[in-house]
Image (cartoon, grey):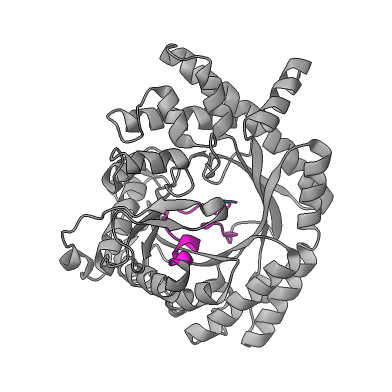
Amino acid sequence: MINISEVFETNKMILEENLDVRTITMGVSLLDCADTSVKTTCDKIYEKLVRLAGRLVETGDEIGREFGVPIINKRISITPAAIVGSSCCARPSDFVKIAKTLDRAAKTLGVNFIGGYSAIVSKGMTKADETLIRSIPEALAATERICSSVNVGSTKSGIDMDAVRLMGEIIKATAEKTRKRDSIGCAKLVVLCNAPDDNPFMAGAFHGVSEAEAVINVGVSGPGVVRHVLKSIRGASFEVLCETIKRTAFKITRVGQLVAQEAARRLDLPFGIIDLSLAPTPAVGDSVADILCEIGLEHPGAPGTTAALALLNDQVKKGGVMASSYVGGLSGAFIPVSEDQGMIDAVNAGALTIEKLEAMTCVCSVGLDMIAIPGDTPASSISGIIADEAAIGMVNQKTTAVRVIPVAGKKVGDTVEFGGLLGYAPVMGVNPFSCEALISRRGRIPAPIHSFKN
């Protein structure tokens, strides 16, 4: 049972500590939209999205007002577009037409992003997969609300190094295509390993083929809440620290569960999962880095950072699983640089490097996220970064990702302003030594021995 003191406590989380429902994401299967004609496929996609998601934004706003819980974003994820367009898209320009259709639907519906302009190529690329991947730079330059993702590896399949090499080139091309906007196209493009089918967070969201016709997934976030409660127990034992984080995550998840079930009921769709991810924003106090400082670090990047992040991530997951039977997606702590003022401060102080961030991704939810790097970084070096992160995910049976932005014309020490939830970022240095010979090899890295569990 919930007592009145817990109601007051939750109200305080919302009013004073930046607790919000970060996103309601409607996952929609577009498998039945596939056709041999690009125009017919696009028409079917637009009609289905507008029909199913016509009340998504309105419903989210209604629930936010009635429950007093800020619901920041309303989004859509779709079946990976490489699958939907496989019968009709012979050229990258054909896939760009699908991207523009998705963007038009997003604007009509009022959602801020549609995710799923994606390809799943963990073991190899079909012709359609490669065609979609080669269309990404133009698609992201020609649209405003499309997010793209490519899954290049998994624990079961290994890592498709041909796709890894290609993605380094695609990220560079996307940066160049959007150079007049500080290469912002790369902020909507993520490369993943072990991507989940039900993630509601962009840019990696897509509606997996194992999912229902349409479903409601909710992402809830509250780094400010966790930081606030940890202030009150400074110097306490690890036992108290862990219990406090776990109890707080439980309460945050219950808020998300309430919103998710109500949204699903009103939209007459199944409730999918709650993703409890401590996703920061540029707002002061809404920072995962600040939580790490409350745990005991001068800055993220100091010795002990990986241990502190592992503790935080584990307790968040334990609290979430206790609160809901349907915790999914990514669920844990995100460590994007541009979206977290504390991370930016740590970079500027010299405490945090890309190498340390990579070590942190071994124990957090995602990976190298929203990191600005020099525009002249070679494509092979970007592919090497992707390969490193994919290896961490593959071996550790977890999701990892890379969302780096090689900002055209920028060098180490410059600052790039992306705006809104994407924030701003200092340009970070990349190891100058080459991995060209490694990335030039063809084929794939095989799955690790512990992947054989049958």
Residue extending furthest toward the top? 236
Quadrant where the image shows the N terminus: top right
Between 140 and 183, the one lying in front of the other is 183
Percent x, y for residue 183? Answer: 43, 67
Labels in figure, total:
0
Q: Residue at x 74, y 36 (%)?
A: 258
Percent x, y for residue 224? Answer: 56, 32
Percent x, y for residue 107? Answer: 70, 68
Residue extending furthest toward the front? 414
Q: Is residue 51 visible?
A: yes
Between 205 and 107, the one lying in front of the other is 107
397 left or right of 209 in image: left
The image shows residue 126, relative to residue 403, as above or below, that is below
Between 410 and 315, the one lying in front of the other is 410
Q: Which picture quadrant has residue 403?
A: bottom left
Q: Residue at x 35, y 27 (%)?
A: 298
In magenta stretch: residue 180: no
Q: Is residue 89 visible?
A: no
Q: Which residues are magenta?
A: 182-209
Q: Residue at x 66, y 42 (%)?
A: 21
339 left or right of 407 in image: right
Percent x, y for residue 375? Answer: 32, 66
Classified by dominant secondary structure, the portion drawn in magenta counts as loop
In magenta stretch: residue 184: yes
Q: Residue at x 50, y 87 (%)?
A: 90
